[in-house]
Image (cartoon, rainbow, N blue to C red):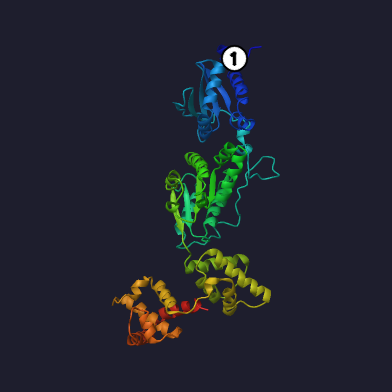
């Protein structure tokens, strides 16, 4: 029997499988068993010609990893088995190519190897047909074939995501991505906004829609915090290769709250490799953040530049009309009814985010059910005073000024400016009228809140508003609407 060191290169020319088997025997003795199973067992030898052994690998990433981490080992091994002239050529499996038109490209890969991009002309080994045979942290138990659990909340859908001016761009982009994941200009899709405005809901709605329309695509939702912890665990167990390879086989990857990656430099390195591979492979990436990517101080510039490749869409705090729509939809799903004035009251007083809005609604419904009382404005005021901090607002001149400015879409400093522009004068007169009606402030004090007007100006303004309400129905409706808003916004 010949020893490995005395192998005749001519013998290997008769059987490429035998040549690669000899290489594997040597490699097995030089790497950990887990590494051998992950990175060398899936490789198939498919040809041997003129001292060039052709190896088929399952992906571009697989080839790049071998060249980066095991190029020296492979070089020494192939020369030991096949002689000093021995070389390797890689054949990379590329999805989406026809068997009849493989479109191969060969380029130098290193001092000892070459690489070719091939179609799916040759069957993958069994271990690589199931991409999650490597190690699947999201396996679904009870299935014969290991499948991935997408980690999605089925209740997060487009149907129960209320669209408004605050989120229209992000929602439209998300719907477009769900139709054609990985093939639109919105890759990556970065959704950013403050806490509780619906970023997670929208991101998961995209994932659920993809699963419905493209059942063969693998979808995975993961929080950045969980991603970091997984990476740490895999690092401790020397299984980083498995970690990277698993994530690079996902078709639609959703990573929530990427701002948590800022202090995790090593995690950013790994995510960069995963991001690059997914993007180059035409896979869809969806990210959420509590701030715009450009403001993520501490995030690697190479990652930030890639975040800008697609679309950065913000979700803002929902406006009054959207807040009402959210409450109505929530009630509809729960099969409940509530007076319109109570809906308006909640929507006016909870202006921070959707979570607090729904929390206020639940608190009112709970009190109504437990105490067997009908829901009315008095119950709403009493409950929200205890459960929602934002509800308790004193009726002050400043609050009235801000509400009127918001109604007329007028900057606050313009309201205080001494100008005769019609829209400013009208807003100022209505504000003085409401301040006199709803506060205990003196006419002099009211005038001082507008930059130093005297009490006669306040009297004139109040009289002007009353006269116009008597003669102009449209103007009267406008003042009454503002008054209604003010009443709802106060306890």
Can the viewer see residue 486 in this picture? yes
Residue 342 sits in quarter: bottom right
For the residue pair 466 and 237, the one nearer the viewer reads as 237
Residue 45 sits in quarter: top right
Can the viewer see residue 223 in this picture? no
Image coords of residue 410 (percent x, y) = 37, 71
Residue 15 versus residue 320 in the image, above or below: above
Residue 424 sits in quarter: bottom left
Residue where numbered disc 1 is placed: 5
Residue 396 versus residue 240 in the image, above or below: below
Split into 4 quadrants, where in the image is the N terminus? Answer: top right
Q: What residue is drawn where x is 50% and y is 78%?
A: 490
Image coords of residue 170 (percent x, y) = 47, 56
Instruction: Single out the residue that lies furthest toward the right.
Output: 142
Image coords of residue 37 (percent x, y) = 63, 31
For the residue pair 412 and 365, the one nearer the viewer reads as 412
For the residue pair 457 and 121, the one nearer the viewer reads as 457
Instruction: Single out the residue that lies furthest toward the left.
Output: 420
Q: Secondary structure at mark 1?
A: helix
Residue 218 versus residue 464 in the image, above or below: above
For the residue pair 212 and 388, the one nearer the viewer reads as 388
In the image: residue 373, left or right of residue 180: right
Q: Residues within 10 Å of mark 1 (few under 14, many from 20)?
A: few
Image coords of residue 413 (percent x, y) = 35, 72
């Amino acid at each position: 029997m010949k020893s490995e060191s005395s192998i005749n290169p001519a013998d290997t020319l008769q059987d490429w499988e035998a040549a690669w088997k000899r290489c594997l025997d040597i490699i097995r003795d030089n790497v950990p068993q887990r590494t051998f199973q992950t990175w060398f067992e899936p490789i198939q030898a498919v040809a041997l010609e003129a001292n060039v052994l052709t190896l088929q690998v399952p992906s571009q990433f697989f080839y790049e990893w071998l060249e980066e981490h095991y190029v020296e080992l492979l070089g020494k091994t192939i020369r030991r088995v096949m002689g000093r002239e021995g070389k390797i050529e890689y054949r990379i499996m590329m999805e989406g190519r026809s068997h009849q038109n493989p479109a191969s490209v060969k380029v130098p890969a290193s001092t000892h190897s070459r690489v070719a991009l091939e179609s799916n002309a040759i069957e993958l080994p069994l271990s690589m047909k199931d991409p999650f045979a490597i190690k699947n942290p999201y396996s679904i138990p009870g299935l014969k074939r290991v499948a991935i659990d997408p980690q999605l909340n089925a209740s997060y859908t487009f149907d129960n995501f209320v669209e408004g001016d605050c989120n229209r761009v992000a929602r439209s982009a998300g719907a477009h991505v769900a139709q054609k994941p990985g093939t639109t200009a919105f890759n990556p899709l970065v959704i950013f906004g403050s806490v509780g405005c619906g970023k997670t809901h929208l991101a998961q709605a995209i994932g659920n829609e993809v699963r419905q329309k493209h059942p063969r695509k693998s979808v995975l939702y993961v929080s950045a915090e969980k991603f970091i912890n997984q990476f740490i665990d895999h690092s401790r167990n020397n299984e980083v290769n498995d970690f990277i390879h698993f994530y690079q086989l996902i078709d639609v990857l959703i990573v929530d709250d990427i701002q948590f990656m800022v202090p995790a430099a090593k995690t950013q390195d790994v995510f960069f490799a995963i991001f690059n591979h997914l993007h180059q492979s035409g896979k869809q990436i969806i990210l959420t953040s509590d701030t715009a990517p450009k403001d993520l101080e501490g995030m690697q510039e190479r990652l930030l530049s890639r975040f800008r490749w697609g679309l950065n869409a913000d979700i803002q705090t929902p406006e009054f009309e959207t807040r009402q729509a959210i409450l109505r939809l929530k009630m509809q799903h729960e099969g409940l009814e509530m007076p319109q004035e109570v809906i308006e009251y909640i929507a006016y007083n909870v202006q921070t985010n959707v979570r607090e809005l729904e929390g206020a609604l639940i608190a009112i419904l709970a009190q109504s059910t437990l105490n067997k009382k009908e829901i009315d404005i008095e119950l709403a005021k009493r409950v929200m005073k205890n459960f929602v901090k934002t509800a308790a607002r004193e009726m002050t001149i400043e609050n009235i000024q801000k509400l009127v400015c918001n109604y007329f879409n007028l900057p606050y400093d313009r309201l205080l400016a001494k100008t005769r522009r019609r829209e400013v004068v009208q807003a100022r007169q209505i504000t003085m009228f409401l301040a006199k009606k709803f506060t205990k402030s003196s006419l002099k004090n009211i005038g001082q809140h507008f930059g130093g007007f005297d009490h006669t100006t306040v009297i004139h303004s109040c009289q002007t508003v009353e006269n116009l309400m008597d003669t102009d129905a449209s103007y009267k409706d406008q003042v009454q609407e503002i008054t209604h808003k003010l009443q709802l916004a106060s306890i």
